[in-house]
Image (cartoon, grey):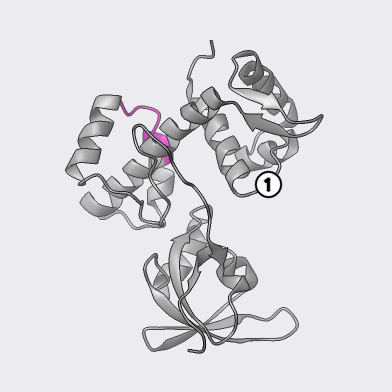
Amino acid sequence: MVTMSRATEDYLKAIYHVAHRGQPVTTGLLASELGVSAPSVSAMVRRLEDGGLLQRVDTRALRLTESGERAALRVVRRHRLLETFLARVLDVPWDEVHAEAEQLEHALSERLEDRIDAALGHPTHDPHGDPIPPRDGPHEEGWSAALDSAPTGCRFQVDRVSDRDSAALRHLGERGVFPGVVLDVEEQEPFGGPRWIRVGGQRHPLGTPLTRLVHGHVLDGRA
């Protein structure tokens, strides 16, 4: 049995996020994701394997077991509920709630988690558009297409925005790019230049690193 320490929960959540971004989960990628050394990752991986929370797909790639997935989802649920609480109740900016929730998620009891959930009206998505796992039952994490793949001239509705980079979130928020917003996708500058979008009558250039953080779906053809 693995003790659910802060480090254990951080690893489970990181493995979950990497896997659901469609990337193979390797020790090297986990080390980069968590900002720790490769030997530290190897040691934790062995503990998670011994505890039945993680298994090897092949010699390099890892995968959460059914028990590991459930444990990871509990952490993800607490994190996203806390982000929603901080944003809605305390007016914490959306580019700051992730870091604050990272600190609080490990100390949140199930009773307080349920109280927060009820007080918020059982929200289904956090401020970044990430789906909040239910207490019980199935959960769909799937990511929609990124803005960088949207055709020029279309109208694009934002579903979710990656919260991995707070500076990028602040930049996008200042330009009105939030979940639920509909924007016009205009021209793409050549040779790796920015993509121009129009939000609320204002035009903004977004480089590829930013358009890859914004996910959503095309509403129709030409804008």
Image spot of residue 10 (x, y percent)? 52, 32
At x 39%, y 38%, the residue is: 77
Magenta stretch contains residue 146 = no
Image spot of residue 190 (x, y percent)? 72, 86
Magenta stretch contains residue 106 = yes
Q: Nearer the viewer, residue 217 or 87?
A: 217
Q: Considering the whole magenta stretch, tell me its main secondary structure.
A: loop
Q: Nearer the viewer, residue 199 or 124?
A: 124
Q: Does residue 61 appear to the left or right of 13 in the view shown? A: right
Asked if residue 21 is positioned above or below residue 42 in the image, the reply reads below
Q: Nearer the viewer, residue 33 or 219?
A: 219
Considering every residue shown, the one lying at the far left of the view is: 119
Q: Does residue 12 appear to the left or right of 62 in the view shown? A: left
The magenta segment = 102-109
Identity, as a three-letter code, of the amino acid under mark 1:
Gln
> Quadrant location of residue 59?
top right
Q: Nearer the viewer, residue 210 or 60?
A: 60
At x 52%, y 35%, the residue is: 13
State the residue position of label 1: 23
Give neighbour class at mark 1: few <14, some 14-19, many 20+ (Cα, 10 Å).
few
At x 61%, y 38%, the residue is: 34
Image spot of residue 22 (x, y percent)? 64, 49
Asked if residue 223 is positioned above or below residue 60 in the image, the reply reads below
Q: Does residue 101 appear to the left or right of 163 in the view shown? A: left
Image spot of residue 89 (x, y percent)? 21, 50
* Element under disc 1: loop
At x 35%, y 51%, the residue is: 125
Asked if residue 50 is positioned above or below residue 45 in the image, the reply reads above
